[in-house]
Image: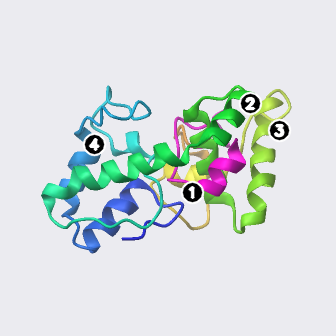
Amino acid sequence: VTIPEGYTVEQIIQLLAENDVSDAAALEESAKNHVFDKFDFVDNENLGSISRLEGYLFPDTYEVYKGNAAVVDTINKMLNNFGNKYDADIKSGAENLGRSMHDIVTIASLVEREAQRDDERARIAGVIYNRLNNSSEFPYLQVDASVLYGLGRTGGKLSDEDLKSDSEYNLYNHEGLPPGPICNPGYASLYAAS
C-alpha cells in the first residue's frame, strides 16, 4: 500500500480500509487508543483522538498483512519509518532553530499541504519562520491548508465565513502554530522545515 505525502490520518485509514488491510473501525480504534509506547514522539497520555498520530505516520510504500490482527503492526511500521526518517540532519536543524520535534513536524505539515512543487518547500518554510520570528509584525501565519484541516476538509476554496471560524487551526485569527500537524509530511518537507 502506498501512502501519499500530505495525507491525513483519516485519509490513511480510509486508504488502508479500501485496500482491505483492515476495516476502518479497527484502524480508527487503534489510532485513537492503542498505546504505542515504543515511540516517545507519540502522545500516549491523551488517548481518544486519531489526531495524536497526525504527522507521524510516514508516507511511503508498505508491505502489510490483511486483517484486523495486523492493524497495530501496520501503524507501528509507519511510526518506525518516521523515527528512521527523522534523521540527524533534521534533528540538527531543529536544534539550531530551537524548535521541538512537534514544531518541526507541524511546520513540515504546513509546508507539505501548501507546496505545489518541490522547489517551493524551502521558500514556504522560510515565510513561516519569518512570520514566527517577527510575530509583532506578522502575528498570523495565514495558512489556508490549516484552516481547511480545522474545518475537516483537505481542499476547496475558503469562504469569508470559513476564515472567521474559531478553530485553533484557523491561522487567520489564532497566533503562532496550530496545535499540531495537519497531515503526514514527507522527507522533503521535514527537511525544509528544519
Give x and y (percent) for residue 12: 37, 61
Give x and y (percent) for residue 123: 81, 53
Q: Is residue 167 in sight in this rendering? A: yes
Mark 3 vs mark 1: give the one in front: 1
The answer to if 190 sits in the magenta stretch is yes
- Magenta residue span: 170-194
Residue at image point 35% right, 52% down: 77
Name which of mark 1 and mark 4 comes first in the sequence: 4
Q: Which mark is residue 32?
A: 4
Q: Secondary structure at mark 1?
A: loop
Mark 2 vs mark 3: give the one in front: 2
Circles 2 and 4: CB atoms closer than 8 Å = no
Mark 1 vs mark 4: give the one in front: 1
- CA separation in Å, label 3 and label 4: 34 Å
The answer to if 187 sits in the magenta stretch is yes
Q: Secondary structure at mark 3?
A: helix
Q: Residues within 10 Å of mark 2 (few under 14, many from 20)?
A: few
Residue denoted by label 1: 186
Residue denoted by label 2: 97
Q: At label 4, which amino acid type do we have? A: Lys
Q: Residues within 10 Å of mark 4 (few under 14, many from 20)?
A: some
